[in-house]
Image (cartoon, helix red, strand yellow):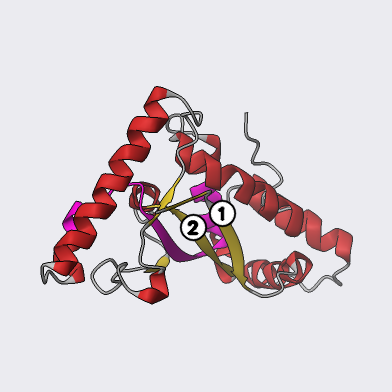
């Protein structure tokens, strides 16, 4: 059994040049008003910021980003609740973790709320080992991967590629990083907070107003 930390990778566009999004968004926005003003970097940033400030976020739907997230399956249950998105996720029906390509083991995500060496962490680790053992035993007894997966833990590492337009990414970060509807789950925050920081670093204007408290 292997224990890993959650992570994410921005996969598309590759490389992500957030500066290129803004002129496209401005052009789309100006269509609404048939405004033919000469664009400059300053005017582009100002217009996109004004559209967001006035709540005209439909213009942000004209640009999309795909991110690969490595996390536990419990976190993906929250991720896929965002409807205006496309998802491709590692399937436990077809992935047989007893095979060599998976290292003949399961991989689990380390929970952030229990320190290594504590009794709670040791109990969690013991449960993960037991799940792995029973899974492998079922495979040896002739169970298929989709049958044996019934004993896999919520902590099982999974990969999910999520694609959203910029407007939906804003909605995702409001719920999963900032917590406008309630405090996000610690394991969701572990992924979503640094992801928002990376989006803010790479894409001017669009996410500047989203602040994690």
Name the quadrant of the N terminus. Answer: bottom left
Q: Residue 70 has which mark? A: 2
Task: Check residue 44 for magenta coloring.
Answer: no
Query: Can you see residue 152?
Result: no
Q: Nearer the viewer, residue 162 or 3?
A: 3
Question: Which badge, 1 or 2, comes first in the chain's sequence?
Answer: 1
Name the quadrant of the C terminus. Answer: top right
Question: Residue furthest toward the top?
Answer: 119
**Which region is colored magenta?**
150-173
Q: Residues within 10 Å of mark 2 (few under 14, many from 20)?
A: many
Q: Where is 30 relative to 185, above or below?
A: below
Q: Is residue 197 left or right of residue 156?
A: right
Identify the residue at horizontal 11%, vertical 72% (top origin). 142
Identify the residue at horizontal 58%, vertical 48% (top origin). 55
Residues at discs 1 and 2 in contact (Cβ within 8 Å): yes
Q: Is residue 37 left or right of residue 206?
A: right
Q: Residue 7 has which mark? A: 1
Identify the residue at horizontal 32%, vertical 45% (top origin). 128
For residue 23, which quarter of the picture? bottom right
Q: Nearer the viewer, residue 105 or 96?
A: 105
Q: Position of residue 163 (x, y in %)?
A: 49, 67
Q: Position of residue 18 (x, y in %)?
A: 74, 65
Q: Position of residue 137 (x, y in %)?
A: 18, 60
Q: CA distance from mark 1 to mark 2?
A: 5 Å
């Amino acid at each position: 059994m292997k224990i890993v930390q959650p992570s994410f990778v921005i996969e598309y566009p590759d490389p992500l040049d957030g500066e290129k999004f803004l002129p496209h968004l401005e052009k789309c926005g100006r269509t609404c008003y048939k405004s033919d003003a000469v664009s400059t970097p300053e005017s582009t940033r100002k217009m996109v910021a004004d559209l967001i400030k006035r709540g005209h976020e439909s213009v942000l739907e004209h640009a999309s980003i795909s991110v690969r997230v490595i996390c536990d399956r419990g976190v993906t249950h929250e991720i896929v609740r965002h409807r205006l998105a496309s998802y491709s996720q590692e399937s436990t029906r077809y992935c047989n973790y007893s095979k060599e390509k998976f290292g003949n083991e399961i991989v689990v995500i380390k929970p952030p709320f229990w320190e290594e060496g504590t009794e709670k962490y040791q109990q969690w680790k013991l449960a993960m080992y037991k799940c792995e053992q029973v899974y492998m035993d079922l495979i040896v007894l002739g169970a298929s991967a989709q049958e044996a997966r019934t004993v896999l833990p919520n902590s099982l590492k999974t990969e999910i590629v999520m694609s959203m337009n910029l407007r939906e990414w804003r909605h995702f970060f409001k719920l999963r990083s900032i917590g406008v509807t309630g405090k996000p789950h610690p394991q969701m925050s572990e992924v979503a907070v640094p992801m928002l920081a990376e989006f803010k670093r790479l894409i001017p204007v669009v996410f500047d107003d989203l602040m994690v408290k």
